[in-house]
C-alpha cells in the first residue's frame, strides 16, 4: 500500500507541474510524458528542473522544459522559439563576444522592471535607473548587480549594463563566470525577448518566461548546447 501511495503521489506531482507550465488556453501535454534520457542527463548533477536550450542555427534556438521525477525525466514543454547571441553559441563566455556560452549554469536569482511574477527564486525589482550589472573587468564589482547613481558608481558604467530596459521586464541570472574571472564575460541572463539576437543571453517571449519563472525553484539549471 505504501508503494502504491508513493507512485500515486509521484504521478500527481507530474500532472501538477504539467498544468502549471501549459500555456494559457491550451491543454496540458498528453500521451507518454517521459522523455527518456535527454542530452543533458549526465551533466546536471542532482538538479530536478532543467531549462534545455538547443541551437537551431545562428542566433536561433529552442527551449525544452524538463522535470526529473521518480519515473525519470519528463518534458513539460518543448520547442519554445528562442533567441541567443548574435554570434551564435561558443564553448565559453568571453567579454566583448556576443555569443551564448554552452554548458550547464545555475539559475540562482531573478530580477525585472516588473514586479515579482511569483517565482520561487530570490527576486529584485528594478525600480529606477540606478540598477546596474557591472561589466568592468578591473572592478571588484565585476559581474554583479550594483545600485548607484551613474556619476557615483565605483565601476566603469560604459562597460556595464543599466538594467532599466524593456528586455529586462523579467530576467533570470545565469551563473556564467561566477568566479568573476576578468575577460570571462558578465551579464548573462535568461530574459524577455525583443525579437532580436542577444549579446550572449537567452531570450524568449515574456509570457513564456513568466510561466517558467513561476515554476522555477532554487537548484534549477539551464543547459545550453549546439
Image (spheres, rainbow, N blue to C red):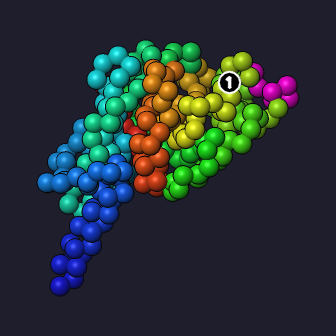
Residue at the bottom extreme of this rendering = 1
- The picture quadrant where one finds residue 87 is top left
Q: Position of residue 27 (x, y in %)?
A: 26, 54
Q: Is residue 80 left or right of residue 188?
A: left
Q: Residues within 10 Å of mark 1 (few under 14, many from 20)?
A: many
Q: Position of residue 119 (x, y in %)?
A: 51, 54
Q: Position of residue 217 (x, y in %)?
A: 46, 55
- The picture quadrant where one finds residue 140 is top right
The answer, for residue 40, to whether it is visible in the render is no
Q: Is residue 35 above or below residue 206?
A: below
* The C terminus sits in image quarter: top left
Residue bounds of the magenta highlight? 150-156
**How many marks do you count on the picture?**
1
Kindly identify which residue carries mark 1: 160
Q: Is residue 11 left or right of residue 63?
A: left
Q: Is residue 220 left or right of residue 110?
A: left
Amino acid at each position: 500500500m505504501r508503494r502504491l501511495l508513493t507512485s500515486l503521489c509521484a504521478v500527481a506531482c507530474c500532472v501538477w507541474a504539467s498544468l502549471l507550465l501549459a500555456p494559457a488556453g491550451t491543454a496540458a501535454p498528453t500521451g507518454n510524458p517521459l522523455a527518456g534520457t535527454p542530452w543533458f542527463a549526465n551533466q546536471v548533477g542532482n538538479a530536478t528542473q532543467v531549462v534545455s536550450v538547443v541551437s537551431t542555427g545562428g542566433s536561433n534556438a529552442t527551449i525544452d522544459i524538463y522535470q526529473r521525477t521518480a519515473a525519470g525525466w519528463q518534458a513539460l514543454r518543448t520547442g519554445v522559439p528562442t533567441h541567443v547571441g548574435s554570434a551564435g553559441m561558443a564553448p565559453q563566455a568571453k567579454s566583448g563576444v556576443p555569443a551564448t556560452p554552452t554548458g550547464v549554469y545555475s539559475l540562482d536569482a531573478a530580477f525585472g522592471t516588473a514586479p515579482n511574477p511569483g517565482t520561487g527564486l530570490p527576486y529584485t525589482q528594478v525600480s529606477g535607473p540606478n540598477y546596474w550589472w557591472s561589466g568592468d573587468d578591473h572592478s571588484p564589482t565585476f559581474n554583479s548587480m550594483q545600485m548607484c547613481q551613474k556619476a557615483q558608481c565605483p565601476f566603469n558604467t560604459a562597460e556595464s549594463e543599466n538594467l532599466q530596459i524593456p528586455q529586462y521586464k523579467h530576467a533570470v541570472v545565469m551563473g556564467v563566470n561566477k568566479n568573476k574571472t576578468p575577460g570571462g564575460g558578465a551579464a548573462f541572463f535568461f530574459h524577455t525577448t525583443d525579437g532580436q539576437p542577444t549579446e550572449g543571453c537567452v531570450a524568449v517571449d515574456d509570457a513564456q518566461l513568466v510561466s517558467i519563472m513561476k515554476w522555477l525553484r532554487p537548484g534549477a539549471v539551464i543547459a545550453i548546447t549546439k
